[in-house]
Amino acid sequence: MFLSYTLDNENFATVEVSDDLDVESLMTLVVADNPLLLNVPRNTFYILVNGRRHHLSDGIVKKKLTDLGIGNNDMLMILRVPSSSAPAPSSSSSANASPYGASSSMAGNAPVKALFSNLVKSIKVPPKVQKPQTNQERLEKMSTQVHTKEFEEETRKIFGVMSHPVAAIRYKDDLPLTVAAYAKDPTNFAAFLEAHKADRIAYFRKFLLTSDPNSVEGQKLIAEFINRDNHQRQYEKAMNEMPEAFVHHLMLYIKIKINGSDFIGFIDTGAQCTTMTTAQVAHCHYENKVDKSFATALNGIGGQQVSVGRIHCVDFEFGTHSVKAPVQVVERLGEEVLIGLDTLRRHGACVDLTKNCLRLEKDGVEVPFLTEHEYREECKRLGLQCNVPMGDESPIPKTEVDSEKLAHLVELGYDVEAAKKSLAKAHNNLVAAAEYLETEKGRQQAGIDEPMDQA
């Protein structure tokens, strides 16, 4: 037979039971469907059915449902006995009570409703999810970085190296307005700072677009990041496999004498002919020997040069050995005396880099090349300009990663190297770096290794 029951007079359930089922087994089914009643003693319940109230005492629970007059399609109200000390009314006195009467309903439903109330209170409602920030809101938050003292100090460092000849090349792509401001007025730091702020905000705007797979500009920036990472890996590989490639190599110089005066000769196998400047010709007192009828265009001498004339025979002294060679005279030259192919071929010269010397095979002479230290000392002694760059060839500072922000990202579970790269790309903006890491994580999970094609 089918029975319907309710615990709160609002929610109903239906079960199918056999005709000979006892009350105890029915309550077991009810408890199985309502775990909150599991530890509640059964003698604290009563059943209200067909206008009769049956307290679940030991004598009642052993009886069959049919013994209590319960039949097919009957409705049962299973309620808790009120906690008051008032005696429970007898079955006979309840014969005329309505199952939906106010007093019985309120008294019986109170304990059950208390159970449901506790259940509701125990449910942990998740906190209200904040509305995700728009790119404009993120940009405004990130842009506050340009108003900090740290940003001004960073700008001063860049301002200090802008006089370096390669600084404009290094910064022109990332900081176009900054480079333009310095070119306009190298002494105006205030204008330089404002231009740097504008460049940084423009960079943040592009950086935020990297999270949008449909943004061509954002994908271009990701491609640029990948390209720079490739450059860094190539650099590290080269440093490991051929570190000597990063050592400065001096050009090939030798000591020579012309008409009793000491000079430094530059060996240039790519120059068409041997040359001297008019200043050095005057120093040797050879002005009257210059034949101006041989003025001509010269190739391979710092590009194309125009010779003002030619000295048909000059004695070059290499230590104790002397060779003769014609010399073209030019107004200006990067080197004071340049020994070119005409002289080298005539004497069968061999540039021996293993022995670090110039061998004149026909004359059986070896002339050692100057070391960098010897070259500097010789230039100092002769009062000549030294053509070796001073200091580091690449003094342009890179963005230094903030160690505290790096530690914070590592605590959040990000890889150390990935966190370093993201902070460098975001110019130490912690929020932007974290967003970039999340974007990269999403790309990896989606199996995207390369940036979007750029048409």
Image (cartoon, rainbow, N blue to C red):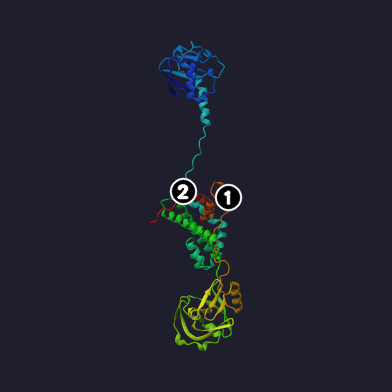
Per the rendering, the mark at residue 444 is 2
For residue 13, side relative to residue 258 (left or right)? left
Q: Nearer the viewer, mark 2 or mark 1?
A: 2
**Element carrying mark 1:** helix
Per the rendering, the mark at residue 407 is 1
Give the percent coordinates (x, y) of residue 173: 47, 62
Check disc 2: other Cα within 10 Å, few if <14, some if 14-19, many if 20+.
few
Give the percent coordinates (x, y) of residue 313: 51, 86
- Compare residues 305 and 258 and report the one nearer the observer: 258
Residue type marked 1: Ala
Residue at image coords 49%, 41%: 129
Labels 2 and 1 touching (C-beta < 8 A): no
Is 306 located above or below residue 248 in the figure?
below
Residue at image coords 47%, 16%: 48
Per the rendering, the mark at residue 274 is none
Residue 320, picture quadrant? bottom right
Give the percent coordinates (x, y) of residue 87: 55, 14
Task: Give the Cα distance between marks 2 and 1.
Answer: 23 Å
- Compare residues 68 and 321 and report the one nearer the observer: 321
Quadrant for the N terminus in the image = top left
Q: Which badge, 2 or 1, is on the more N-terminal residue? A: 1
Give the percent coordinates (x, y) of residue 123: 51, 32
Residue type marked 2: Gln
Using the rendered image of the protein, determine whether residue 333 is visible from the camera's viewpoint: no
Residue 70, picture quadrant? top left
Quadrant for the C terminus in the image = bottom left
Using the rendered image of the protein, determine whether residue 119 is visible from the camera's viewpoint: yes
